[in-house]
Each structure stands twice: as C-alpha cells, then as structure tokens.
Amino acid sequence: MIVKEEFLSKLRRYFSLNLYEVKIWTALLSRGVSTAGELSDIANVPRSRSYDVLESLEKKGFVVMKLGKPIKYLAVPPKEVLERVKKNVNDDAKEQIKRLEDLKKTEVVNELNTLHSQGIELVEPADLSGSLRGRHNLYNHLELTIRNAENSVDIMTTSQGLMRKIEGFKPTFEKLKKRGVKIRIAAPLTKETIGAVKDISGVSEVRNTDTKARFVIVDGKEIVFMIMDDNEVHPTYDVGIWVNTPFFSSALGNLFNTAWKDMKNPAEALKKR
C-alpha cells in the first residue's frame, strides 16, 4: 500500500492522529478487515506498536475489534468516523468551556488578577506596547482592547475594514452600547458598505471620511494602529502596533474629534456617489 506523505499529513491535521495511527488506519481502510500483524507489515509500523495503535483507534471510534482467534479489526466507514470525531470534538469543547466557566467561581481568577495588577504597577510605561503580526492576531487584540472600554471607542478605518469590524465586533459593540460606551466609526462610505452601516446604526455612529488611516482609540488611553494599507497587504502580513499611552491617545483623540465635526453622515455622503 502506497499512501502519499501529503495525504497522511492532512489526515493527521484533520483527525488529530499521530503518524502511526494514520498509517494503520489507512492500511485497514484498504483491507476492510485485517489482523494487527498484517496491518503492521502493510503500514510499515513496528509490530510491537500496532496493538497499542489499534487500541487507540478503537477508543476514538475509527475501528471495531472482532472477537475470535486471531483477533481481527474492522474499518469503520469514513463518513461514520467523521461524525464520531465531530461529536467527540464538540463534547470535549463543551467540557472545556464548562471547566473554564466553573473557574470563574473560584479564587483562582481573583489570585491571577491580583498578580496581574501588582505586576502592572512595576511595568514601565514604555513597556506597555507591542507589535501585532497577522490580521487574525491583530483583530483578536483589537477585540480584547475594545471589550474593556469604559467610556469611548473611536475607530478610523477603510471601507473593507469597516465591514470586517462590523461583522466581527458587532456583538462586542452591542454590549458596550448597553454599558453606555460611545462608539464612533469613520471610514470611506461606498455602496458596498450600506448594508454594514445599517446593521450597526443602532449601536454606533458612522460618518464618512476620505482620510486613509487605520486606528482605534479606546477611552483616550490606548491606541491600536495599523501601519499598512489593507488593500495592498495580504492578511497574514498585516501589522499593527498597540500602545497604552494616555498622552498620545488624547492628542490623537483631539484630532479625531476635530475631523469628526466636518465628516458627513452616511445619507449625505452617499448622495454624491
């Protein structure tokens, strides 16, 4: 049996199996039913390991052991395996979420918060900054920063950035709105952004700007700004800088406030387009 390494790698990634497990499993799939010794020879897996591997695959729902002598193993249909794996992943995720939720009720979180607050007091202001590489990491940090807002969130972004942020952050924006946080978003408004603007209209005020910039100011204290044009960079190479600096944040916030007064609302901006 010849199975390409690339295919085995995909199976390992998708089904969270080790190399011996995917080799034994694919060998069994090619035979339908077989003994551990036969599978060891076909898959080129040490015979001393084949029994442990098959036992692991059986627990995970990939194979069924047939009683008798010699003991044989039957391959479970791949479609059924997929459903079993999905169920196991879902069950594991629910259990993990439950453990984390239960953790909130313990003193562990309070002790961690105490450690963090004590540590922050020792941090130099210049150390409260960081570089964020890749749009996925960038947006994860943006959401964390925005989620902790107490008074205001000011965003200047691109048309595409506006739609991404509304799609990804709307639930967070809604929670902030309920807490009385003021949210303002400035972006170049186009016909493509109409749906996104309507979707966020009850939560955030949106105005049009022709300025090309990408930054977020939270409570006039923290800034996350992106240093590249999102139309010209692949998401994996996007770069942002996070800085906790009330001095610079308030200065940039004042500039945003001045520009905001001259920005047109969506209805006015789209009349000319």
Image (spheres, helix red, strand yellow):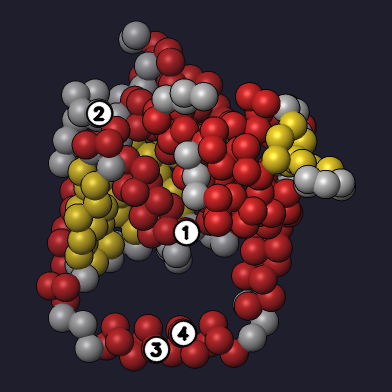
Q: Position of residue 105 (x, y in %)?
A: 67, 82
- Front-most of residues 182 and 167: 167
Q: Residues within 10 Å of mark 1 (few under 14, many from 20)?
A: some
Q: Is residue 41 shown above or below 246?
A: above
Q: Amino acid at mark 2?
A: His
Q: Is residue 84 visible?
A: no
Q: Quadrant of the C terminus?
A: top left
- Front-most of residues 251 and 44: 44
- Front-most of residues 76 and 96: 76
Q: Nearer the viewer, mark 3 or mark 1?
A: 3
Q: Residues within 10 Å of mark 2 (few under 14, many from 20)?
A: few
Q: Which residue is mark 2?
A: 234
Mark sitting earlier along the chain (3/1): 3
- What's the CA distance linking mark 2 and mark 3? 38 Å
Q: Which mark is residue 112?
A: 4
Q: How many labels sit on residues?
A: 4
Q: Nearer the viewer, mark 2 or mark 1?
A: 2
Q: Which residue is mark 3?
A: 115
Mark sitting earlier along the chain (2/3): 3
Q: Name which residue lies at 29% across and 83% down.
A: 120
- What's the CA distance linking mark 1 and mark 4? 19 Å
Mark sitting earlier along the chain (4/2): 4
Do labels 3 and 4 touch, CB within 8 Å? yes
Left or right: 14 as drawn, with respect to 219: right
Q: Amino acid at mark 1?
A: Arg
Q: Which residue is mark 1?
A: 147
